[in-house]
Structures are given as C-alpha cells and as structure tokens.
Image (cartoon, coloured by chain):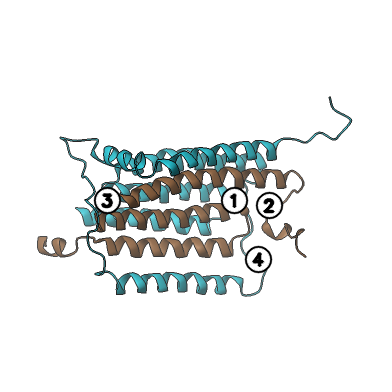
Chain colours: A cyan, B brown
Amino acid sequence: MELFVFVVAAAMVLVGAIGVVTRSNPVHAAMSLVLTLFGIAVMFVSHNAHFLAAVQVIVYAGAIVVLFLFVIMLLGVDTAEDLSVEPITNQRPLALIIGLGISAIVIAAIVSSRTGLGPSGEGVNETTLESPDANIRQLARVIFSDNVFAFELTSVLLLVAVIGTVVMARKTKSVGTGK
Amino acid sequence: MSVMFSLAEPTSTWYLVLSAVLFGIGTIGVMVRRNPLIMFMCIELMLNAVNLSFVALSSQIANIDGQVVVFFVLVVAAAEVVVGLGIIVSIMRRRTTLTVDDMSGLKG
C-alpha cells in the first residue's frame, strides 16, 4: 500500500516537474506546478508530516500558484511562447548535462551513505485516531520553545517583503506635478 | 506477491533519490527557460525537492527538527515569490516582452 502511494505520488511529482520545464504556455506550466506540489503534499502525509502537508496545499497550491497566475494574467503573457529557437548555442545540451550531473552526484552520495544515519531524536509522533493532533502538538512545541526567535524573525521577514513590494510596485509620481 | 511488496517497502532512500531527480529537473528548467515566471516556478521546484528530502530525513532519523526547517523554508519561499513577482511586474512596466535576455541593461 505504501509502495502504491509512493509510485502514484512520484509519478505526479515527476510529470508535473517535467511539465513545468517543457510546457510553452505559462498557464499550463503553473497547472503542472500544482500537480507537483500536490504530489509532494501526499509524500508529506506518508511521512507523518500532516501539518506541513496542509500548509503545502494552502500556501503553495493556494497562494503562491494563484499569485503566479495573477501575474501571468496581469502582464498578459498567457500565450504560448516559441520554444523551438535556441538563443545561445548548445545551451540546452549543456544545461541537460549539468542538471543530470548534479542529480547523479547527489544520488551517488545518497546511495553511498544510506546506512550512515541512525535515529538521533526522540521520534516523530504518529498521527492516530486517538491523538489526531499529535504532529501539530509536537511541531508547535519545538517551534515555540527552541525556535521562537527564528519564528519571530519570520514575521519581520514577511513584513519587510510586504512593505518592499508595495514600495516597488507603487507608481512614482514625478516631482512637482502631483500633489 | 505479498513477500514482494514487503520487500519493496519504500525507504527514505527512495524519497531522497526522487528529491534529487526533482532538484535536477528544476536546475535544468532554470538554465533552459527564458521566461522569468517559469524560472521562478523552477526555483519553487528546487525548494520543494529540498523540503521533501528534509521531511524524509526527519522521519529516518526520528527527529522533528527537519519538519521545523521545512516550515521556515515555506515562509521564506512565500516572501521570495512576493518580492520576485513584484520585481517582474515593475520591469514589465517599461518593456513589452518577457524574456530574461532582454534584461541585459545592467551588464557592464
């Protein structure tokens, strides 16, 4: 059963990822991104990371992809672009070699060190029918005790991002003409 | 048949290999595509690959800290997308085409 879930989710992830890279229409690429993000969320659930799966669907598939689609529509670039021309000579074969090389190196490192990591913490609580909020409780305890300073800093980061975007996207009036 | 399935239980190595492949696809996308929006989506793919490996390792070493890191990565990714899309929109105010090749005005 777990194998079945893994195969289906991995197929979703890979098909979506290849779709993002190869689709010529940005709207289709954004839809492929949604497929990938849902596959990742399924894998989070199978690793007992239920809170992160929910956040993944809400923040990524809900907010970020909608933001992408909003910008695509706002800029009016929702038409297929011509992918047949290759502006830089040998760009695609080189990119393919570099990308596959990075993947191969990382996979070799994973396979060669796969037995080196043993349990080091107190365990990840499994969500069961008796304790449906086990994952959220454990995560919240760690975030609000050991990592509370980092958590507060993320609120500052979000505030800076919002203010920066507003300042950047605002139309600047030329001096002397406006009130 | 059931023996085969119990033998082929997906371990965290499978998830790590999948995340490496996903990261490679994202890298290829960033290098090949010229539409900045698609490049942003490929960066999201790479972030998600790293998130997946964090969660897989978190359950392998039985430590919740990996999930905490993923939580913070999600926040940073949201902020990054907001700022990046703001930059793209403000660049597109002055231009009509949307390829990164046209944005070579800062080249020395």
Mark 2, residues whose alpha carbon is within 10 Å: few (<14), some, or many (≥20)? Answer: some
| Label 4 vs label 2, nearer the camera | 2
Q: Position of residue B35 (x, y in %)?
A: 62, 55
Near-viewer residue (A64 or B73): B73
Which residue does the numbered mark 2 point to in the structure image? B98
* Left-right relation of A82 to B56: right
Do residues under tags 2 and 1 come within 8 Å of each other at their CB atoms?
A: yes
Say whether disc 2 or disc 1 marks the residue closer to the N-terminus: 1
As helix, strand or loop, the secondary structure at mark 3 comes to: loop
10 Å crowding of disc 1: few (<14), some (14-19), many (20+): many
Instruction: Inspect the image, locate mark 3, and give the three-letter code of the amino acid beneath it.
Output: His
Q: Of residues A136 and B81, which is closer to you in this image?
A: A136
Q: Are marks 3 and 1 on the same chain?
A: no
The answer to whether residue A61 is seen in the rendering is no
For residue A46, side relative to residue A16 (left or right) = left
Please check whether the numbered discs 4 and 3 fall on a single chain.
yes
Q: Is residue B9 positioned above or below A158 on the image?
A: below
Give the residue at x 74% y 43%: B93
- Tell me how far mark 4 sits from mark 2, CA to CA: 15 Å
Say which residue label 1 marks: B37
> Which badge, 4 or 3, is on the more N-terminal residue?
3
